[in-house]
Structure formats: C-alpha cells, structure tokens
Amino acid sequence: MTTFERQMREYLPVFQSTVANDIGDWVVKGFIDTYRNIYTVSVDTKVISKLIELMLFPRIAEFARLHGYELHLAEHQNHYPDLTLTGTDGQKIAFDLKSTYRTGARTVSGFTLGAFTGYFRDRDSRKNISFPYREYGSHYVLGIIYSRSRESIDERSKFRLC
C-alpha cells in the first residue's frame, strides 16, 4: 500500500461524515433560495453527484494541506481527473470522484470511468486532461455508493414523462 493510499484510507471517515450522519442519513436535505424557500434534493443522479462533489471538495483540500499535497482542480467540467494532487516530490496523482446508487443488495447502477480515447492512447496529449497522462504516477477513484429511499423512487416514477 502506498503512502497516499494509507493516508486516504485513514481519512475516509472524514469524507463519510461530510455527506452522511452516523446512521447513514444525508447531511444535506435540500436547497434554500434567498426567499427562504426550501427545495428537496432531486433524485437526478447528476444533481446528487454534483452535490457530493461540492461537499467533498473542502475536505479534499483539507486532506491535501494536512499531507503536503498541492491541489489542482480540473479547469473544465469534462476534463480528467477531477483533481490532481502533487506531492512534495513532484509526483502527480490523478484523483477522480464518482458516484452511483445501489440497485440491489450487491449491485449498483454503474460508474462512468471515462472514454479512454485521446489522452489515454496519446499519453502526451493535453486534450480533455489537466496534465498529460504520462505525468501521472498513479490514478485513484473515490467511489461513492448511495442508497435511494423508496419514497424518492416512487416520487420519480410519478412525474416521469413518457
């Protein structure tokens, strides 16, 4: 196990407590506007993924500071990876956040891990990647798997357009 892996494993409880409480309930229950209207969190996976990212970014920045990594956020939404951590030795670590929901006791909807076209094949390419692929010493994915409540699934089916 690398030093980074050990550090990440030790920090996982911080990530967990950022998005859910001790019994697994989401910390964020909705959004509030300037008129104090509250909107529940959508069951849309893109909304949930973005919410998770927004909640975790400050904790990842805290992790980077704590362990002496320089943190680089992707400049564009469709660039790989979500974050680049650079160690004091100059080694770049690709760090991607992915989320999906459970579809059964041992199954999930799936993760989209990338197209692996341009930069994956041309390791010196800068297209859709923060730094050339060749510069990364390692690649990690923090996978977040969540459960959807029966109520949210039922609500979604009520409003589906056909």
Image: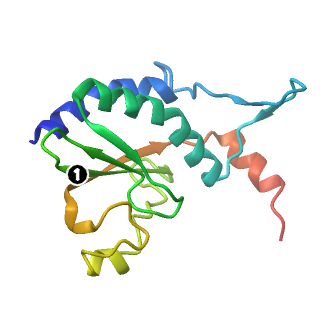
Q: Quadrant of residue 112?
A: bottom left
Q: What residue occupies the far left of the structure in this picture? A: 1
Q: Is residue 117 visible?
A: no
| Among the 4 quarters of the image, the one containing residue 30 | top right
The residue drawn where x is 80% and y is 61% is: 160
Residue visible at 29% across and 27% down in the picture = 11
User: Which of the pair 90/103 is nearer the observer?
Assistant: 90
Residue 69 screen position, x and y as percent: 26, 36
Of residue 112 and residue 96, the one placed in the foreground of this image is 96
Residue 17 in view of the camera: yes
Identify the residue at horizontal 84%, vertical 66% (top origin).
161
Question: As drawn, is 55 to the left or to the right of 106?
Answer: right
| Residue named by callout 1 | 92
- The residue most toward the right is 35
Relative depth, front residue between 97 and 121 = 121
Examine the rendered structure and indicate whether residue 149 appears above or below residue 124. above
Image spot of residue 71 (x, y percent):
35, 41
Q: Position of residue 81 (x, y in %)?
A: 38, 57
For the C terminus, give its image quadrant. Answer: bottom right
Tell me how many marks there are: 1
Residue 99 screen position, x and y as percent: 47, 49
108 left or right, relative to 88: right
Identified by mark 1, the residue type is: Lys
As displayed, is residue 3 above or below residue 115?
above
Query: Looking at the rendering, which quadrant does residue 36 occupy?
Result: top right
Give neighbour class at mark 1: few <14, some 14-19, many 20+ (Cα, 10 Å). Answer: many
Q: Quadrant of the N terminus?
A: top left
Q: Secondary structure under badge 1?
A: strand
